[in-house]
Each structure stands twice: as structure tokens, then as C-alpha cells.
Amino acid sequence: MTKTDVIIVGTGAAGLFCALHFSRQTQILMITKEAVDKSDSFLAQGGMCMLRGEEDYEAYFEDTMRAGHYENDKASVEVMIRSSQDVAKELLEFGVDFNHNGKELAFTREGGHSMPRILFHKDSTGKEITGKLLAQAYQRDNITILEHTMMLDIIEDEKGCHGIVMQAADGSLEMVQAKYTVLACGGLGGLYQHSTNFRHITGDALAIAKRHNIELQHLDYIQIHPTTLYSEKSGRRFLISESVRGEGAILLNKNKERFCNELLPRDVVTAEIKKQMAKDNMPYVWLSMEKIPKEEIESHFPNILQQCKEEGFDAMKECIPVVPAQHYFMGGIKVNLASKTSMEYLYAIGETSCNRVHGKNRLASNSLLESMVFAKRAAEDIEGQISGVDFTDISRMADLKDYQDTKKLKEEYRTIVLDEIERERKSHE
Ligand SMILES: Cc1cc2nc3c(=O)[nH]c(=O)nc-3n(C[C@H](O)[C@H](O)[C@H](O)COP(=O)(O)OP(=O)(O)OC[C@H]3O[C@@H](n4cnc5c(N)ncnc54)[C@H](O)[C@@H]3O)c2cc1C
């Protein structure tokens, strides 16, 4: 059995930012199902929002609320926006290289934003941020990271959560005893045929939470991204970042005519595209970058250009086919402003959690920010209490024999999540 003060499940931006906010006396074990660079955080293209200044507060708040259909929790939105400059400052201190205009930070714009307030690193902001966080985590003696290691369950008694059951990289099963457990398992795109998410991001924490009667919320609040590159190949869908439209790209129907305002919130643009695809009887619509200066395309969107080339399209010269796909999950494990779940000693952060900041529809580039703001709050909340918490003997709380058939277990988890989504969806009809 492994013993650690805190176990963090997931090594995306949320898990890493959380780990980096514990004191160096607190022992942290982090695990990830795959290699460390295979988290959705690495895929983020567009950027991370930051409040430009006090004069931007009301507009940023209103943009977030409008995109979320005013179902957002106002206190969560306020915390996120008010914390954004500190998070950006910390990232710069960790060495994150955001784009600059001369000496000033550069800001881009995406759908739903009334002004440019998105920090970015070319079109690979997630890789830049998460890579730098990972490098910091590897330098800390109190943080251990295990790759290809999967959480199969949490371990609980009537007092709360005391650790997890995991399957190690060599296939062996093990219990991890921890004073606190933090779930940072990302979204659920891997459950969908067409998604921009990594295939292994399958909402495991949601199924486990459901089995342990931990409160969940808004499981049917699933965001479809309007523009992913159309492909006949199977697997993850490649995102064409909203900032491409923010910089001037337009959507066209099969006759190459414009059919909607490209900068409306994601759910509205998605609905317009789907309507147009049905009208045209086509599996995609066109996206034209003709209006963006060529130097801007080359310097801001090099990865998108490259990916389009691999699919046989030269985005500098021709339109590219785009189609909506599952992208983000606004619901999740219900948490308070400190990211605590309904179970003692158990926290949830990042896309796995639901602090209601995004309401019914996330505003572009609010998720990396939200992940880090509330991950830090979880670490601070736990750190403030951990000295008064003892380890609990878990040796009799789980039987590893129950976890031997991992294939069956994974199938069961899939079914639990998909059934819950459907149940919630029906309850809203
Ligand atoms: C293509 C794409 C582009 C995006 N662009 C942007 C953007 O420009 N701006 C923005 O703000 N947001 C963007 N997002 C959303 C944003 O990247 C994610 O919401 C955010 O990074 C989620 O971070 P996370 O740490 O919660 O989860 P993730 O980064 O997905 O990490 C989840 C971690 O949990 C691990 N895990 C899951 N289940 C288990 C298990 N059972 N056992 C062990 N480990 C497990 C995974 O292996 C992984 O390490 C984008 C998302 C995608 C897919």
C-alpha cells in the first residue's frame, strides 16, 4: 500500500496547478491514465482569459453570464475573474511565454467576447502552460508523478474519503492511503464518437462519484464546438480554434455564401452550422481565412495550418471543411467555492468539477483559467486543515479482488455516465 498526504488524480492544468500550491512539506502523489503530455490541457489552442483592468470587469462578467445563459453562479464567476490577473502573473513567473506586442502582453478575441482579453502562445497555449507547470512539478521533491496509472475507485467510510484503488502501469492493483483526495480527471469526450478530447478522457470520476452517492450536477451540459476539421478518419477531431474566427475567418455554405455571425457564443454558432448542413445536405460547412493577413495566419496559427496540410488543405489559399464536435463538459461533480465535494476529504477540480462558473455554456478560453483558479483554492483549503487530519487505516475498506476485471469495470463506468447524461437530458425536456 502507498501512503501520501494528498493523492491528485490527473496531471492536466488543474491537477498540476493544485499540486504546485501545496507547501513543500506536504507529500503529493499524482497519477495519470496515460503519458503526462496526453491531457486535454496540452491541446488547448486559443488561450486563457484575463481581466484587462477594472474598466473591463463588468463586460467580462456579462460576456461570461450571457454565454452561460445566465445560469452561471455569480459568486464563482466573480472569483474566477478577480483571480485571473494573479494566475497570469504566476504563469509568467513559471516561465510561460505568452505572445507580446512589443513589451506589452498581446490579447486575442474569440466568440462571445466583447473585446480582446485572451492571452495566448501562438495556437498552442495549452502545451505552453501545461508543459511549464509540469516542468515545475518535476522540480519539486514533494511531488511524485506516476504515468499509465489508473484510478479504479475511491476508498471511503462514513467519515469520508481516505484514498483510492489504482491499477499501476504493470497492471498490478494497489490501494493508496491519503488524507485528502483530489479528482482532476478532465471531461468526458472519450465517450463520444466525435470529440476534440483525448479518447482516454472518459468521465471515470463521474461514474465513481455516482457509485458513492457523491453529488453531481448538470451532467447534460455538454458543449459542442462549432468548428473542428472535417475528416473521414476515425479518432480525435482536430479543433479549429475560435480565435481563427476572432481574427476574421468566416463561415460559408456550399455556394460559398456567408450564413451567420461567426462571433456569437458557441452554442448559437453550432446551431447555425447544423441548420446550414441540413439545408445544404452536406456533412460540413466551409471556413475561409481569406480575410486574415497571411503573416497573421503564419505566426498565430502554425499548428492549424500544418494539420490542415496533413488533411490535404492549404488554409492560406482555400476554404477548409469544418463540422461541430463534442468539446467541453460544463457539468460535473458538484463543488463549493473551495472545490470541496459533498464527501469529506474529497475535492474535485478542473473539467471534472462543477462550480457552475460556466452556466449552461462555457465562454471561450474561460476553462484553463477556471481550472487553475479553483485548483489553487482547493490546495489552499486542504493545506489549511491537513495538520489536524490523521491517516485512516484503509486495509479493510476495499478488496482488490473486486477490481481484477478492469475491462468490465471500465464498461460499467461508461454506462453509468451515459445513462446519467440521458436521464438528466430527459428531465429537462
Ligand atoms: C482541442 C481542445 C482545445 C481547447 N482549447 C482551449 C482554450 O483555448 N482555452 C481554454 O481555456 N480551454 C480550452 N480547452 C479546454 C481545456 O483544455 C480543458 O477544459 C482543461 O484543460 C481541462 O483541464 P483538466 O486539468 O481539468 O483536465 P485534462 O487536462 O483533460 O486532464 C485530465 C487528466 O486526468 C487523467 N485521468 C482521467 N481519468 C483518470 C483515471 N481514471 N485515472 C487516472 N488518471 C485519469 C488524464 O489522464 C489527464 O491526466 C480545449 C480543449 C480541447 C480538447
Image (spheres, rainbow, N blue to C red):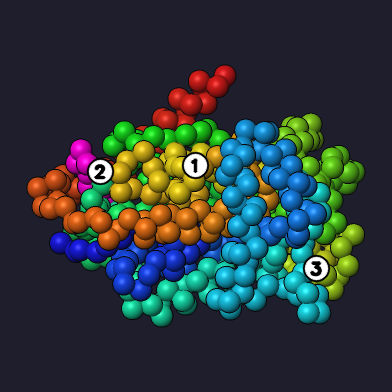
Kind of residue at badge 2 = Gly
Residue 256 percent location from the top left of the image: 88, 46
- Which tag, 1 or 2, sits closer to the chain's start? 2
Q: Which region is colored magenta?
A: 152-160
Front residue (pair 174, 368):
368
Judge whether 101 appears above or below 347 on screen.
Answer: below
What is the spatial separation of the Cα atoms under label 1 and label 2, in whole angstroms? Answer: 20 Å
Front residue (pair 206, 118):
118
- The residue indicated by pointer 1 is 354
Does residue 335 belong to the magenta stretch?
no
Label 2: how many Cα within 10 Å (few below 14, some 14–19, many 20+): some
The disc label shown at residue 160, or none: 2
Residue 125 image-quadrant placement: bottom right
Q: For the point 72% across and 38% down, which residue is it?
A: 66
What is the spatial separation of the Cα atoms under label 2 and label 3, in whole angstroms? Answer: 51 Å
Of marks 1 and 2, the one in the foreground: 2
Kind of residue at badge 3 = Ile
Q: For the point 50% across and 62% down, which residue is it?
A: 13
Of marks 2 and 3, the one in the foreground: 2
Q: Can residue 226 be seen in this view?
A: no
Q: For the point 22% across and 41% down, which residue is it?
A: 159
Label 1: how many Cα within 10 Å (few below 14, some 14–19, many 20+): many
> Mark 3 falls on what kind of element?
helix
Query: Which quarter of the figure is the C terminus placed in?
Result: top right
Classify residue 93 as left or right of residue 278: left
Query: Which quarter of the figure is the N terminus placed in?
Result: bottom left
